[in-house]
Image: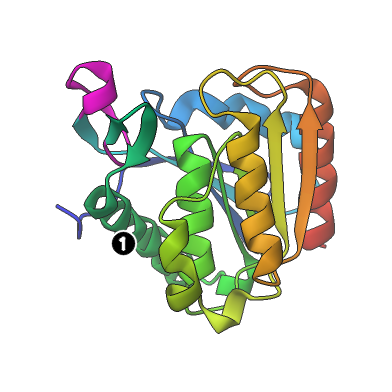
Amino acid sequence: MAGDLLEALEVETAPSPRAAVLWMHGLGADGYDFVDLVPALGLQTAPVRFVFPHAPMRPVTINRGMVMRAWYDVRDDVGRRREDESGVRESQARIEALIARETSRGIAADRVVLAGFSQGGAMALHTGLRHPERLAGLMGLSCFLPLADHLPGEASAANRATPIFMAHGTHDPLIPLDRARQARDTLARLGYRVEWHEYPMPHSVCDAEVVHIAEWLARILA
């Protein structure tokens, strides 16, 4: 059910965290996907709680209806992959519940970062841009902007100036680079500040990208 709190893994870089990073995984993966990245981000001296939620299990149309962890269903309409709007909005509500849990544990919304890879990155952008309270930052890796046509009418004024980090591989066979650039350009036209990076990689994460992520997180959580 949309109201249920998602199960999640948690890693705290130091006792009594004063900031939180909610990091959503990609299609078919789970919360374990990026746990091992935390030490490489160099935040051991800063008290940060990383939360890696597991997406719900659901059938995915482009994968022949196989049931897997997915933030929303994906269809292939006339050669173009399209996200299921109801699934996107259901997962938005679940991520909002995770933000609310962090605030209930004493971490203000403006100390919460929403991050994610692929589908998870799409959800980080979608949810964060609509969240009614100012967030610390939004990070979308190897992703695009879901329901982009709805954004102008749904965007929250509170996050108009929130830092956004986006990165993409120039050889990504799953989400074309042009689609990610289109998302970046849409955000720029709407007045958002986007830090953009491209790397010579497929649909993945590379060492140089991890360095840039670490620098960005250290800066916005300083």
Question: Which quadrant of the figure has residue 202?
Answer: top right
Q: Is residue 61 magenta?
A: yes
**Is the residue marked by circle 1 packed among few (<14), some (14-19), or many (20+) residues within 10 Å?**
some
**Percent position of residue 220, x then y:** 78, 61
**Percent position of residue 119, x then y:** 45, 37
Residue 71 seen in this snapshot: no
For the residue pair 76 and 51, the one nearer the viewer reads as: 76
Secondary structure of the residue carrying tag 1 is helix
What residue is pinned by disc 1? 93
Which residues fall within the magenta stretch?
60-73
Tell me: residue 106, above or below residue 26: below
**Percent position of residue 160, x then y:** 64, 76
Which residue lies at the image location 41% right of the left edge and 56% below the top edge? 147
Query: Could you tell me the amino acid type at mark 1?
Result: Ala
For the residue pair 34 and 82, the one nearer the viewer reads as: 82
Which residue lies at the image location 61% right of the left edge and 25% below the top edge? 36
Q: Is residue 4 magenta?
A: no
| Image side of residue 64 versus residue 182, left or right | left
How many numbered tags mark residues here? 1
Which residue lies at the image location 49% right of the left edge and 46% below the top edge? 122
Residue 203 seen in this snapshot: yes
Question: Which quadrant of the figure has residue 16?
Answer: bottom right
For the residue pair 122 and 212, the one nearer the viewer reads as: 122
**Percent position of residue 189, x then y:** 68, 66
